[in-house]
Amino acid sequence: MNKTKSDSIIEESEKVFANTYKRAQIVIDKGAGATLWDKEGKSYTDFMAGIAVCGLGHCHPAVVNAVKAQAEKLFHISSLYYIEPQTKLASWLVKNSFADRVFFSNSGTEANEAAIKLARKYFWDKGEKNRFKIITALKSFHGRTYGGLSATGQDKIKKGFHPILQGFENVPFNDIKAIEEKTDKTVCAIMLEPVLGEGGIILPEPGYLKEVRKICDRTGALLIFDEIQTGIGRTGKLFGYMNFNVKPDIMTLAKALGNGLPIGAMLAKEDIAKAFVPGSHGSTYGGNPVACAGAFAVAETIEQEKILDNCITQGEYLKKRLNGLQKKYSFIKDVRGIGLMIGAELNIDGSDIVKKALEKGFLINCIQTNILRFIPPLIIKKENINALINALDDIFSNFA
């Protein structure tokens, strides 16, 4: 049997890459909107968006054109000089959020590293050198670097990498009493995802985040929101915290900020950001001109094309259709989510369902072994959702 183009690429990949990913046996070649094609030309409807990254879908013309134009002018110069695309993006983020200052990184975990460092440096500068602990949530995910994995509330992420960094304590999400008991004068920050993403699409209970804000205000601890997954429209608001009327002191972004370009950001209030001075922190590529030009195009497009409205409308429709399946199949335990960040919790392992969906031309994934996650591009259409539901209905019928 002759090898396909995909077969050859997969075979070569298995020889040369570190074995850190469990990959589906396809080679994605190109994309447009919510559709992807493999090397053999088979199409797939994307309900993963590169893990909540491609909010505008694949190869959005506005982003492509911005990247092309900037690439023809300047690829890189470093933040030792002023860069116009960097300034425009930072100004937009400040204008549209609680924050006064921005630090750019290359990824989400690097943005979280910056947030962790800033929180500790803030209290160090105040003379409170013993105030370094950070409270995070069980089932949280804050990245793969040592700071990020130390903050993460999942043992499987930390396995094999001990000793992890000191000063992080995990408490159950939605448990105010647990936070109150842990928050003393050694705690510099409480760091939470407004909605737990990798942990299972777990929403905060009514009033939970407001109570956390009150604890921070009372004790002086800083409130950090990790909005790597919830930020830039995923929840139907520009930033997730806006759904709950709670402003953080520090926020981190990445993923959808660049629609696939490697960029992250840490945002902070003025008095806190002052703890960072020249030499405190840095990044060679952070705020790269090409990445910032593309990210600014994302920002403009979200505003001009009413992307948030579509996110809310289609998110509600997707939940409605999934709820219909839940009534039909008893192994669907729960359907939950906000905007286009939706999970369907099962009473069975979801890995085979993901494989069957792939065969039918749909990209979804499974987190925590039994939660199907749907995080499509924010431009997804009703007909895409209907096609997915029909495919899942057929797949589920074999598990009933």
Image (cartoon, helix red, strand yellow):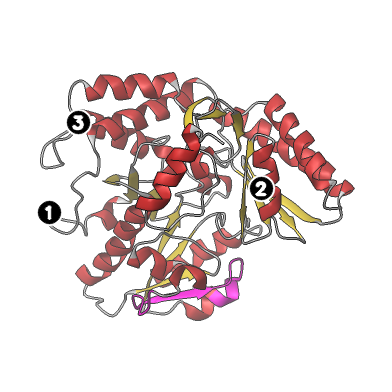
Q: Is residue 60 left or right of residue 176?
A: left
What is the x, y in percent for residue 107? 35, 48
Examine the rendered structure and indicate whether residue 95 appears above or below residue 345: above
The residue under label 1 is 278
Q: Please tell me the numbered disc located at residue 345.
A: none
Q: Residue 124, located in which quarter of the rendered image?
A: bottom left
Secondary structure that dominates the magenta span: loop
Residue 7 vs residue 229, the one in the foreground: 7
Q: Which residues are magenta?
A: 161-178
Q: CA distance from mark 2 to mark 1?
A: 47 Å
Amino acid on which the number 3 mark rests in the picture: Phe
- Residue 354 shows which numbered tag? 2
Element assignment for label 2: helix
Give percent across and percent down for residue 347: 77, 61
Q: Earlier in the sequence, mark 2 or mark 1?
A: 1
- Does residue 14 appear left or right of residue 370 in this picture? left
Image coordinates for residue 142, horizontal then vertical, percent: 43, 60
- Above or below, comparing residue 147 to residue 100 in the picture: below
Of residues 392 and 327, which is closer to you in this image?
Answer: 392
Task: Provide the residue designation for mark 3.
Answer: 75
Residue type, numbered disc 1: Pro
Residue 171 in magenta stretch: yes
Side of 83 relative to 240 (left or right):
left
Query: How much space separates mark 3 and mark 1, taking CA atoms?
Result: 24 Å
Residue kind at label 2, given as amino acid type: Val
- Residue 83 lies left or right of residue 113; in this view the side is left
Is there a contact, CB below 8 Å, between mark 3 and mark 1? Answer: no
Q: Quadrant of residue 102?
A: top left
